[in-house]
Structure formats: C-alpha cells, structure tokens
Image (cartoon, coloured by chain):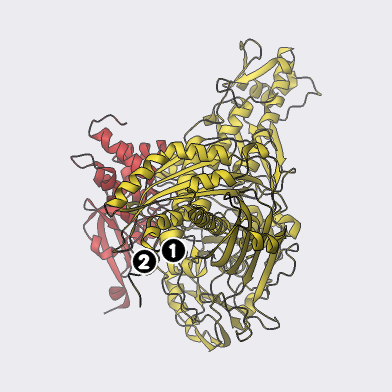
Chain colours: A red, B yellow
Amino acid sequence: MTDAFRNRIDLTFTVNGEQVEATVPAGRHLIDVLRLDLGLTGSHAGCEHGVCGACTVLVDGAPVRGCLTLAAQVQAAEVWTVEGLTDTGAVADLQAAFVARNALQCGYCTPGMLVAAKALVERETVPSRAEIREHMSGNYCRCTGYEAIVDAIETAARARAGEATE
Amino acid sequence: MTIRFDDPNRPNSYIGRTVPRPNAGKLVAGQGRYVDDITLPRMVHVAFVRSPHAHARIVSIDVGDAQAAKGVVRIVDGTEMATICTPWEGKLAHLQGMKTPPQHALAVDRVRYLGEPVVAVVARTRAEAEDAADLVVVDYDPLPAVTDLMTALDADTPIIHEGYEDNLCFRRTNEAGDVDGTFAGAHKVVEGWFKSGRHTGVTLEPRAIVADWKAGEAELTAHVSNQAPHMLQVLLAKHLDLPESRVRVVCGDVGGSFGVKVHVYPDEVATAALSKMLGRPVKFTADRLESFLSDIHARDHEATGRIALDADGRILGFDVDDWAAIGPYSIYPRTSAVEGLQVTNLIGGPYAFDHYRVRSSTVFQNKGICAQYRAVGHPVAVAITEGLVDKAAHEMGIDPVEFRRRNVIRDDAYPVSTVAGLKLEGLSHEKSLDALVEAMDYDALRAEQAELRAKGIHRGIGIASFIELTNPSPFMYGIGGARISAQDGCTVRMDPDGSVVALTGVTEQGQGTEAIMAQIVAEAVGIRPHMVRVVTGDTRVTPFGGGTWASRGAGIGGEAALRAGRALRDQILEVAASMLQGKAAALDIRDGVIVDAETGEDRLPIEEVGRIVYFRGDTLPPDLPRELMQTRHYITSNYPYAFTNGVQASLVEVDPDTGFVKLLKHWCVEDCGRIINPQLVDEQIRGGIVQGIGGALFEEVCYDAEGQMLNGSMADYLVPMSGEMPDMVIRHIETPTEEGALGAKGAGEAGTAGAPAAIMNAINDAIRPLGGEVTAMPFTPERILRALGRIRD
C-alpha cells in the first residue's frame, strides 16, 4: 500500500448544489475541507470539540458539526453552508431578522446559528421562546447574551407561520 | 452651530436613533473576513511547542527528528528568537514599586507557566507543524510551582523570579479619613469574605495572526485579531527594530475580543518575527486548548472586607483587603496591576461616606497571565461592595432598595470628588433606582416571593448598584509611559457624488462601531447614514488612535467623528456659499442637499459641490479652501475618566435539593450619557450581563496544586448558553458628559460590572432563610449545597 493510498481519500460530494471532487488527507474534518480545500470560509472553527456550534452545516438536510465530521463521512452527501443558503435565499428571512434585531455582534457564531435555526423556522408550528432557547443551546455566542437571537428566530418563525409579530 | 440633540425633530437626527449596522449584512451572509480566513501566497504555518510544566528549567532542546519531519520549514527556539526580537516588561512608571521581569517571545532557560511557548515549528500546513512539534524533545528540570494566592508571599513559598525578594508584583493602599476610629465607634460593623474565580474571555474566534514581511519593501503587514492596531504597530516596530511607518497592522473582522485581544502575546510576536526571518507570510491561529492556556485570564481575587454603619443605616466607611493572583509576568503593555488598582478605587463607588481603606496586593503565580478583561476590576469591586451592602441591609433589617436609597450619592450633588479620590462629573443613582423599582414592579415581586416561600419555593431578588469607568484619559496608561493612545481621530472625505468615507482610529469587534460612526458623521455632515462608508482597523490609512477598549469608542472616537464631520460640513458650506454668492452661515445641509438654513429651501445638491471642487476647481476663487477632507482628533481633558452608573437586579429560583440556580429575569438601568443608537446600547448591556453571569455561575479556569490546568476545553469549562439565560429588561437614564459636544460615555462594560453582584445577592436572598450564604464565585450547585449544609464531606 502506498502512503498516498493510506493517507489520502478521494471525495465526491455536493456542496451548495455544486458537485465537488477533492483528494484530502484521511484525517481531515469536514470544516477543514470546506474552509481549506474549498475556500468556503463562512463556516467557522470555534472549539474543535463539537461544543460551540460555530461549524454547524447541513449534511443531507440535518445540522451537523463540521469539526466532528470526518471528510470521509460526506462521500456522496449533500452539504449546504451559509454561502449556499444565502445564494438560494433559503434563510433570507432569518438573516433579515438577525440584522433587524441586531442578533449578532462579532458575527463569528452567526453562520452556525442560522443553520441551527433553519430547522426551527421550518417546523409546522411556531416554537415557544423556551423551545428556541433549548434548540439553540448547542450554539455558543459570547457577544449577544442570546435574547436578541431568540427574538430574531421567533420573529422569523412567526412570519413563516403567517402570524403577525408582536 | 451646535446640534440640539434634545430636539428629536431637528434635521438629520440620526444620533439617538436605532439604525441598522452597515456591516451586519456581510456577517450574516458568511462574508466576514476573519484572520484565519486569510490565505496568502507562499504562506506557512507555525505551531508552538508549549511548556507541559508550570515551572521548570529548560535543560536541553533536541529538534533533530522534528527538523526531518515532512513539511517542516524552520524551527526556532528562545535563544535564536531573542536575537531578532527583544523582550518586554509590562510596567507603568506611575505604579510605584511595581515589578515584573523581562518576558521573551519564546521561553529562554526557564518556563514559568503551563502553555508558555518554548519552540516555534514552521511547516507548510498547520497539521504538519503540529506533527513536527510533537517530535521536538525538550528536557525539563521541574521546579516547585507557586499556585496558591493567599500564601504567595509567605516566607516558605518559593520565589518565582530569581533576584526578587518575594512574589509581589504590586501593592497599593488607598486610604482616607479615620478608618480605625470610625470602625471602632460605629453602630454596627458587617464583615464578609469574597472570592472571584479565575476566568477567561473565550472569544469564539481564537487569537490569530498572519504576519507578512516583504523584504523588498522592508515592510511588515500583520493581519491580527486585535482591538488596538496602532498600539500593536508601535510595539511590533519596537521589538522587531523597524520604523513604525514600516509596520502595518490590519484588524479586519474580529470574532469577539472583550479585552482578550488588546494585549501583546508572545506567540503572536514570535509569528511576526518568524515572518521576518523567513521572508514569507506566517500564520498562527490558536486552537481552543491554546486559547485556554495562553489567552489572558482575569479576576482571580480573594478579599475580606467590612462596612461601618450608623444607627440609621448610613454607611460610614469601607475597609477592604483584596488579593489578586496573576501569572508569572505582568501583561504587556497595560500591566496586570490595573485590576487590583481598580478595586482600590471602585469599592463603595455609588455611595456617600467619608472613611476609606482598600488595599490590593497583586502576586505572581505559575499560572496563565491575568490581565484586563471586560469591565476590568469592576465585577470584583462591585461584588465586594454590594455583597457587604446587602449583608448590612439585612442585618439592619432594612429593605435592600431602601438601604441603597439612603446611601447613594444624591443626583443633585455632582460634581463630586469621592473619598476614594474619584472625580465624578454627573451620575444618576437615585433616578436609576426609581426606574429599576418601577421596571421590576419591585413590591409585587417581593409579595410574590413571600407567597412562594410559604409553598417551599425559594426565590431571591438581588440588587447591585455600580459605577463604571469609561472614556479614559492618559491618566490610565499614558502617564505611566505606555505607548497606549488615549486620544483618537477621524478623517472624513467627501467623494464627488456627495458620499463620505470616514476613517476612524477606533475599531469594530461587533459592538457596532461602524454603525455609530456612520450615524455621527451622517448627522454632522447632513447626509444619510448609508452614504457614509466607515473604515476601521488599518494603521496605514486610519488616524492614529487607541482602538476600542475601556468603553472609549463612542465617547472618544465618536466625538472625533462628530468634529471631523462638522468640519467637513463647514468646508462644504464655504464652497457652496462661494458658488451661490451667499454666506455659509445662512446655509445648512439636510439629507444631502444644501438648503437655506432659515427656510429649508433647496439651494444646491451636495454632489454639485463635489463636481465643482474635484473637476471644475478653476471656476472657484483661487484662494478658496477646498479640502473636502477633514481630520479631527479628540482627547478628554477635564476628567481622568467619564464614569457611568447603573443598577441591576436579578430574580432567581434556587433548588435547595440540587443547588441549581434558575435565572428567571434580569433588569438593568444604566446611564451612559448620550445614547447614539438605543438598540446597540441595549445589546451591549445584554451581552455584558450574560458575560457577568458566566463568571457568577459557571466560569472558572481550574488549576491543580502543580499548576496543571484541569478544564482546558469548552466541554469542561462552562460558558453561558441560550438555554439557561434569562430575558433582560434594559432601561436608561441619560446624563450626558459635558466634556464634548456629543455627550456620550461608554456602554460596553456596565452589564458585566454589575451582573455578578446582582446574581450573588439574589442567590443569598433566596437561601439566607435556609441558613446559607455564598460568596465564592462561581456559585456552582456544589457550593450552594455546601452553603446549605447539604454536603458536608
């Protein structure tokens, strides 16, 4: 077995709707593939421990930690990052609500927050504030104190449900 | 012409309004550019071999295997590093008796804290650099570690620095009045013991630098995640022996700072030096373990204190002995003495009394370096003060709000020089208390608390008044010889179409600096905020300034922006008056149109002035000034600091069986003077409160007796997350400073200053009837159960 065979893997997967082929070190995590190999720097590495949520991206529709996911795990998967979700407008209402409510300060956690919040606003019912706080409790933000983030998500969820915001 | 800020119907009334942040759009789209996002041609990466010991002699370093590892470009140890990078000492001349030894970018001969950088390994990728760093063999001879605060000065404690007589870095006693006599004759004396856990900033973006030395231009460009680019420019130039004009520091998007990123770090300076050695770009990004080990820590304090009272419950005096543990070095260039120094100034800050003695002793430890972190020293001083005040109120049988009403400095008493030596221009403790009581519906909450208590539900209400130091003058650092700028500047330039570029020396880490600068310049010139492009964080183009720290951005940088904007407006009007053959004083600019000041009638679009000045200057009188670019710098001069004030309240529920604290609600009334953007101020307060809650309930960097860190990951070091945090009600009183026309004081740290004390008082209000009291932060379930006697072993 050659070193290259042992230490590198060939990947074919879809990122933001575009097919990607890459040969990467076998130990590479998804967040590093996105940031280092594909130049998608919108997702951030925060703790590299799966705790802070800054690296949250969508893999086959589910929010996952980019820092805990090995590149090999996304073979043939469909990955979406903040860049793609921005281009398609999939989270445009959340983004607008975050800006209007100042639900971000330094912005480092925000891409992960948006990916995590996407699932909440896509639910059939409007989540309560306690549900929003619980759902978002895997995403660390040092700046805002979270209340504005909860407000912004609540606003977007109500708007999607056709409810007037308070 | 002055701006009537109190008239909401004035033209161009952007100051005082919530307007969106111009830089928020790119951040929600993932288009921010943080340092680690930067990749440069030929860039290499550095990983550091860090000390595994808290204290040891370096016997030998063997880099043979590492040198041969894949991808390695260069390996440098402390001795070699010292040949191109001089060491530094974090001292201030006005802090008499302070001592600290030289600190090197890489350790030379001896390591003095866990994680101290020892060897730099540069390789093609970070992974290769880390792999090779693992192959560096450093032979250490371990030495005894000094890790206990209260015994640091004992005769049998080893001395960390050779040649020193003890482990004392700095000690100050601030004493006035007759403390001993007052306490001896007081109606009542209440005592307390308080501890604040060593914690750290945990910025979500770790510290990072890309240093790019270009030999051909003899210039170093450093992209750094930092709050004070001009400070770093000056210090990198000094220690790498470069002219300051040949060092460019660029601070783009910064993923949180809170004081963590206002200091000089050895690994960052080493990275810049390595770039100079190699002649190519070098990147260093701290990983999370490195962040816990090497970011500054803060608030490692322990204190005993007492408060003297007369029979009416009036405070006569405070007497506090505070101890602070730092690392083996004082931080550069701000020093690690300022936290303790603040405690000696801030105890009893909101109150009127005549007898004062506060001593603070700052001692060296073989742990990470402690330094300035959001609300420097305030959370410690406020917790001691408000802990004693609450205890005093309880023992006197006086309601805690009523006790504060009796003792705060009256709103009509200002200006005041306090017994601690603070010059206070104008504060609003009485109005703030009134607003707090109203916002909380205090009496109803007390009634509800009593009802629930009868049902076995233990709720507590905690109050904490505070003052907060903002807008520092050179009295903070400049007079001590540190090259830290207290002044700041702003340059505004009108482009031909009437839009404006504003370059400011203060920086943005998410506070909303760009938004408020756009508002201020827009109002000052007479255009809409979206017509102002704000540029921050690049020493090549922005006016020399101090950056953003100590809540100075709005008050200092904002005033400079206001003055620069007004100067540009005056210049535009002078040209317009010439074009219109009228008088500048009869004209005004509103919404980008030059109008008759009296009637509001349109006279000339502003872009016509731009067209004439830039492209048809031949049509203007030759001697007419035509600089549509103006710079103004501003420094405060009447007061060393602009103090703000406020009061916070916390409502908690304590489960006496589990020791868990549930945060039900939090209130803050604060007075930061003129509010430029209400939403941004509210969110500064909210974020600050939660950061304070972190220190009160969760956060502590734990070391064992040998100086090994026990919780260096985000899985082990707890921070506030959304699930546990309360909603927060924020109210404002506005007492503008009269130092400048803007009247703004700082707002960034008030939340953090008062929150820990409010939480502590709320918990104690809940558990005092059960016979418990907690005064050692963080208030973990275990500590609460011990206080209640539920755990005894």
Q: Check disc 1: other Cα within 10 Å, few if <14, some if 14-19, many if 20+.
A: many
Q: Quadrant of residue B574?
A: top right
Residue shown at 51% from the left, 51% from the top: B754
At horizontal 68% and vertical 69% (from top left) the residue drawn is: B170
Q: Secondary structure at mark 1?
A: loop
The quarter holding residue B694 reads: bottom left
**Res A45 seen here:** no
Does residue B251 appear in this view?
Answer: yes
Please indicate whether residue B436 sits to the left or right of residue B455 in the image. Answer: right
Assess disc 2: are there few (<14), some (14-19) or many (≥20) residues with their C-alpha within 10 Å of its C-alpha: many
**Cβ–Cβ below 8 Å for labels 1 and 2?**
no
- Please give the label number shown on residue B371: none
- Host chain of mark 1: B
Q: Secondary structure at mark 2?
A: loop
> Looking at the picture, which amino acid does disc 1 mark?
Val
Image location of residue B618, percent across then percent down: 74, 21
B362 versus B511 height, above or below: below
Residue B788: give its label.
Answer: 2
Rendered position, B521 above or below B660: above
- Residue B738 relative to residue B125: left or right: right
Locate the N terminus of chain B and report the quarter of the image it occupies: top right
Location of the C terminus of chain B by quadrant is bottom left
Hey, what amino acid is under mark 2?
Leu
Outermost residue to the right? B623
Residues under labels 1 and 2: Cα distance?
9 Å
Q: Position of residue A126 (x, y in %)?
A: 23, 39
* Disc sitting over residue B774 in the figure: 1
Give the quarter of the image for residue A87: top left
Residue B275 in the figure: left or right of residue B479: left
**Position of residue B423 measured from the top left corner of the image (x, y, whole percent):** 70, 47
Q: Are marks 1 and 2 on the same chain?
A: yes
